[in-house]
């Protein structure tokens, strides 16, 4: 793969531990499959080696554990820093997950994500930035930026069934209810040397968003499922997003 160049102040991170993500994954897989009727489609789209970015929609609390459990490879995911407290935070660190402060451009999180991809591992992110309708109507630019930095393929992931319509984003589906995870063909982005101009990142983010929406429609048709719709009080996250019209601040 073509070597990538990052700003010097974003380099040098070791990244999250790999061993925990690998060793504890079978336990997570067994637990998730024992609790719910999990159906996974087209997992072969995830490359067996080399860096890869899993870009998933986000409607419910269970999305992260579900992707971690069913992906073909150990996963390091970006998780809001509010989750890294007490016993839960300790477990998340041990299994190699990445804390992010969503109120700022978190250089530490960026370093960790780039380290994961640099060493050829799997990174899961949620381009919408927060739990909500899960329709990719708006996405953050980070997924495109990571692709431009590294050239890592971006695999769309559609998650369906993790939130019942009318329920809160923190709810968990009932035991033995059906959960669907659909992986899509990887998107390729040629790496661009630093510095990467904002309009270039924005253009690539728009292209990525189009592919994510197309994959989501395919997943709904394939599974016969639909999205749960918007929530009454979605989580709010500051920062630029990419919509059909372009970037907002």
Image (spheres, rainbow, N blue to C red):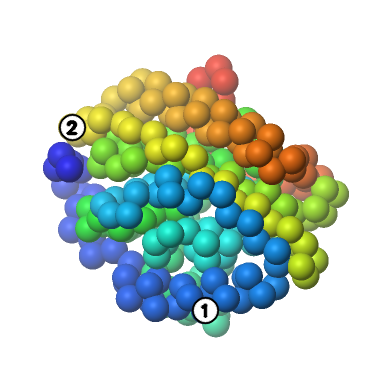
Badge number at residue 27? 1
Gap between marks 2 and 1 measured at Cα: 40 Å
Above or below, comparing residue 142 to residue 201 in the picture: below
Above or below, comparing residue 110 to residue 200 in the picture: below
Q: Position of residue 185 (x, y in %)?
A: 44, 37
Q: Is residue 140 visible?
A: yes
The structure residue drawn at horizontal position 66% and vertical position 39%, both measured from the top left corner, is 222
* Label 1: which secondary element: helix
Q: Position of residue 1 (x, y in %)?
A: 17, 43
Q: Position of 240 compared to 188: left or right?
A: right
Nearer the camera: disc 2 or disc 1: 1
List the residue tagged with mark 2.
193
Q: Residue furthest top?
A: 245
Q: Is residue 138 visible?
A: no
Badge number at residue 164? none
Q: Quadrant of residue 170?
A: bottom right
The reply to whether the C-beta atoms of the residues labelled 2 and 1 are less than 8 Å apart is no
Q: Position of 167 compared to 23: left or right?
A: right
The structure residue drawn at horizontal position 74% and vertical position 43%, both measured from the top left corner, is 225
């Amino acid at each position: 793969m073509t070597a990538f160049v990052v700003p010097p102040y974003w380099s040098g991170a070791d990244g999250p531990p790999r061993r925990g993500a690998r060793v504890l994954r079978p336990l997570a897989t067994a637990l998730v499959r024992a609790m719910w009727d999990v159906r996974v489609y087209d997992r072969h789209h995830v490359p067996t080696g080399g860096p890869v970015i899993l870009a998933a929609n986000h409607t419910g609390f269970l999305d992260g554990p579900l992707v971690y459990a069913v992906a073909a490879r150990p996963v390091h995911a970006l998780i809001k820093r509010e989750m890294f407290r007490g016993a839960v935070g300790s477990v998340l660190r041990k299994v190699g997950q990445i804390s992010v402060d969503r109120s700022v451009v978190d250089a530490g999180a960026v370093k960790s994500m780039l380290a994961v991809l640099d060493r050829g591992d799997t990174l899961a992110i949620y381009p919408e930035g927060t739990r909500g309708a899960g329709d990719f109507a708006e996405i953050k630019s980070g997924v495109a930026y990571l692709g431009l930095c590294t050239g890592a393929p971006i695999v769309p992931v559609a998650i369906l069934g993790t939130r019942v319509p009318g329920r809160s984003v923190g709810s968990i589906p009932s035991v033995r209810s059906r959960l669907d995870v659909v992986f899509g063909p990887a998107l390729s982005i040629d790496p661009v040397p630093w510095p990467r101009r904002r309009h270039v990142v924005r253009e690539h983010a728009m292209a990525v968003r189009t592919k994510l929406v197309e994959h989501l429609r395919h997943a709904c048709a394939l599974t016969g499922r639909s999205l749960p719709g918007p929530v009454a009080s979605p989580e709010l996250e500051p920062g630029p997003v990419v919509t059909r019209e372009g970037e907002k601040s």
